[in-house]
Structures are given as C-alpha cells and as structure tokens.
Image (cartoon, grey):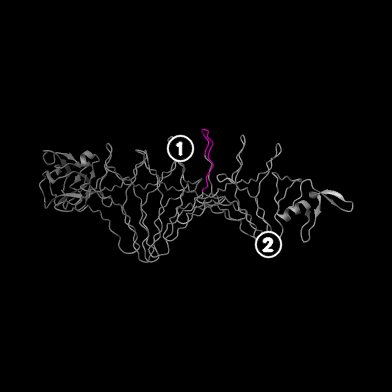
Amino acid sequence: MTAAPDTLVVTGPNFEQVEAGDLLVTPTGATQDSLADLLATSTGGNVATALITGNASTLNVRGQAANQGGAVVVTGGTSATSANAGGAVSVVGGTPGATGVGGAVSATGGAAVSGAGGAASMVGGAGGGAGAGGASAVTGGAGAGAGLGGAVTMTGGLGGISDAVGGAATVRGGAGQGTAAGAIASLVGGASGSGATGNGGVSRVVGGAAASTDGTGGAAQLTGGAGVGSGLGGAATIAGGLAGATNAVGGAATVTGGAGQGTGAGAVATVTGGASGGGATGNGGAASLVGGAAASTNGTGGASLVTGGAATGNGVGGAATITGGLGGATNAVGGAASLRGGAGQGTGAGAVASVVGGASGSGATGNGGAASVTGGAASSTNGTGGAASLIGGAGSGNANGGAITITSGAAGATGVAGAIGISVGGATAGNGSAITITGGAGAGGTASGGNVNLVGGAAVSTGQPGEVQVNADSNMVFATYFFTGSPAATDQVFFLATRALRVKTMSEVHSVAAGGASTMTVIKDTGTAAPGAGTSLHGSGSFNLNGTANTVQNATVSSTIATVNLAAGDRLAVKFANAIQSSAGIVVTVGMVPI
C-alpha cells in the first residue's frame, strides 16, 4: 500500500496527528526514512503522479542499499499503439534566474571504495526486426543572440594519484554483423552559418599536453584499421576539403612537425610507407607524394614539392633529401632514388627533370648554390664508388636520342661566365685515371660514327675568341720551313691551309749566322698573291738571321684577330729582307689552333 497525500498518522503518547511524509521510521536492519517513502519502496508500488517535486534544495532518487546496490531505472512508457513511439525520457537542468547559468545535467558512474568506478553509459535503444538502432547524441546547447553554441567535451577520467594513466576517450563506429562493414567514426567540424563569409569549423585531433616537468606531449595518430586474413589494412587518408562551387581552391592538406621551444629543433614530419609482413618476399609499402590531378579541360597537374624549412638569422636553410631505402641485411642493393620529369601524352614532350642549386641571397657577395650529382661512396673494404651518369633519353622510331648539354652559369653584369671542369678524382695510390670522350658508334650498314666536337666560345667585337687547348696550350697544328745548307734569299711558301686556323706562335733557329745585317719575316698570303707579298704575322720586329747561331728566337705574334686567322686556301711564306750571305741551317716553325 501507499500513503495517500491526505493521510494522517496518529502517534505518540499524546496521540498527535502527523503526515506520513513527516513521520520518521527505522525498520529493523534498515535505514531510517519517512513512513511514506518506506511504504512505497517496500511494496514496489507505482508513483501515480505527473510531477515529483522536491521540498528541499535537492531531490534524491536512490537505489536500495543492499549486498548488491539497487539500480535506479528511469524508463519511458510503452506505447499501446503499434505505430506510435515509446515515451521519451528527458533529464533537463533547471531553469536559472535572470542572470544565472542553467543547471547542469550530469551522468556519473558510482564511486568505488577499492574497485573500479562504475561506468556511465549512454546507449541508443536496440532496433527491432530490421529497424535501425537508436542514435545516441550528445549535443551542446544552442546559443542565443551572439552567444556561442555550447561545447561538447568527452574526457577520459583523471588518473589515480600514484602515477596512474588517465582514462582513454574513444569514439568508435558500431561493429558490423556477418559480412557488413563496421560503421564510420567521424570527427566533423561544425557547419558555418548561411551568411556570405562564415567558415566551416575546424576538425582537430590533438595529443594531450604534458603537465609534468619534462614530459612528452601525447602523440596524435591517424591509423587505419587492421585487416584480418588476406584483407588489406584500412587506409589512412588526410584530404583537404572540397572547394566551393565558384572556381574556389580546394583545402590544403598539411603534415607539420611540432614547433620547437627555445633552442629546441622543430620535430620531423614523416610520411612513411607501411612495413611488410614477416614473410620471405613481402615488400615495404611505397611512400608517395603526388600532386593533385587536374580535372579541368586544360588544367595543369598539381606540383609535388619537397622543400627544406626556411632558416632565420644566420641559420642554414633545411636540406631537402631524397634517399633510396637501405638494402637488406644479406648483400642486398640499396633502393634507387629517381628524379624524373612527367611523361607527355600524345605528341606532348616529356617534362624537364631539373636539379637546380638554390639562389643566393640579395646581398653583395652571396654565391648561388651548387648543383651536384655524386655517385655513392663505397663503405666496404674494397668497394668501387658509385658511378655518376648523365644520359640523354633514348629516341624511338627514326627520332634522335636526347642530347646532353653541360652549360656553365651566365655571368653577372661585369663577371666572367662559369667555367666547365671535368676532372678525375685524385688517387690515393697507383696511377691516375683517364678521361675519355667518345662519339657514338654507328649501327647497321655503313652508318658513320659520331664526331667529338670541341668548339671555343665566340668573342664579342674585337675580343679574343675562345680556343681549344691541351694542358692550357692552344698549339695543335704546326708548319715548318727548313733548308739544309745555305738557301737562296728567295721568298717561299711553306704551308697551305686546308681549314680555318689561327696562328699562335712563331719561332726560328739557324746553325750559321749571316755575318752581316739580315732579317726574315713570316707572311700570310691570300688569294693569288705571290709568295711573301701578303701581310706580316709579326706584331713587331722580325727574325734576325745574324743572331747567335743555334739560339731559338720567339717572335711576337700580331694581336689583330683578322691578321692571324687563316681561311682554307691561305698560305704561310718566309720573306727575306737581305742577301743570304753565310746563313745556313735555317728552321722556322709556326704553331696554330683549329677554329
């Protein structure tokens, strides 16, 4: 039975009339309580009212104290009509005063004396038949006016006092049944308002901050689910948001290492392919950095950049390194590192693959960065260093193979263009190595071999043209006049050019002096000029045939390029200015370079 609201109880020596709710009773072996409450709980009766109102600052609903604490269940009513919903159960914080905060609503598991605290669960209702399970929603309160919407926070429990770990906070999609996939677990930023410029809310996964003296911040991980059997592991994707409808740019996707503090270095940002399984032949997963594909009619594919971090002050900019993977333990080859331009489509050319040194700063003396292609160093006892190869691309059909061009850097306003050096590495013992430049071999039939062509640089105006040198000396072609005994003092041609040449040096020696004044000059004859009728190649003076016998005389060659250049058909001649007298054994040699 239950005590009606108007029930009075007669009690005490004076037979006082007391309401059932004000009469305290202590049952045997139980806790003291009001008579009205004890009557209701002892009989399992229903509270037949639409409202239960506390008569003090707190209204407590407690489960019965017993060996196993009694549960407290609040259940919505069962619908009596098949198509109608069951009764809802709402727990709502109290309405505040004019400027106060609305009352909080808390669901807290029971505190334990020695065991684990009780769980606090919010579970959607189970579906019946083929019906979906009920959703379980936690939603912050709606803001009013310019106020922010209420935050929703899910926090693991505080760790115990003795170095215990805090409780985990997990958002997990529901498990599938049979062959059905597990449900998605989403962390989604809030949608913007419908105005012109509002941005969607950020979605963040942030590791916990360390509060200890030297503790490490908690890691933030995005990990695909583990596969079973022959199933693939779940992909982990970070994708920028879809752009708006009107030519907007898609959202960036960034992986950034944490910033250092004080003198600490910034943390590494790593994109790493998955490790293979423990079997004999599984390969490690590739790590790809791929620019976005263009979907427009003529759009350019997105660039793929690996850029070292910018330095500050006098610091060096961060290096950008592409390194092949380490070889396996048993004499395996290291992984290749390739820099390759994109392939063309249809008749389009393949893209350039460039290795470019960094630009200098804008100050007075900074140098541009070098661009180096270096073979790998051998670390074994007697291993050969890795080759550095520069190879033009192979042609197809009847097209030519790709050319190889090595071009030094252009000079500044008054500087000299950069030199090109090809040097063999220094030997630590034994002979130095040769440098070989070989023209391409012909293939099939009577095809010719390729030439090796060395061309000096062109001069501007009256400047000295560049020349091909051997060991810093341009003399490669030599013409000699000689006469055994005493010649007649007759002007005579001794060399006919069959290609373009430039005179570089002229020398003379004789075995017997003339015995009197006697000189000779070397002449360039052109066209139909008679021997010795052309232009002197001496910058000044001439050979003295009366000089000391067997002593070499070196002439000063003219500095006028037009004078010293020979075209095919031009000749070299000796011109005597005096009688031969006693001169004998005269030899003249002219050194030239092809141009």
- Please indicate whether residue 257 sits to the left or right of residue 568 in the image: right
Where does the image place residue 5, in percent across and percent down from the top left?
77, 46
Mark 2 neighbour density, 10 Å: few (under 14) some (14–19) many (20 or more)? few
**Residue named by callout 1:** 244
Residue 548 x, y percent position in the rendering: 20, 51
Which residue appears farthest toward the top when viewing the image? 196
Q: Report the front residue among 72 and 457.
A: 72
Badge 2 element: loop
In the image, is residue 532 above or below residue 328? above
Q: Please rate how many residues cluster around mark 1, counting C-alpha atoms within 10 Å: few if below 14, some from 14 to 19, many from 20.
A: few
Asked whether, in this view, residue 466 is left or right of residue 188, the answer is left
Q: Give how far across and how far down residue 377 sits, in percent.
A: 37, 59
CB atoms at circles 1 and 2 under 8 Å apart? no
**Which residue is label 2 attached to?**
114
Marks 1 and 2, how far apart at CA = 56 Å
Mark 1 or mark 2, earlier in chain: 2
Q: Is residue 195 magenta?
A: yes
Residue situated in front as seen by the camera: 403 or 25: 25
The boundaries of the magenta stretch are: 186-199
Q: Amino acid at mark 2?
A: Ser
407 is higher (above) or lower (below) than 325: above
Residue type marked 1: Gly
Tell me the mark number nearer the camera, choosing from 1 and 2: 2
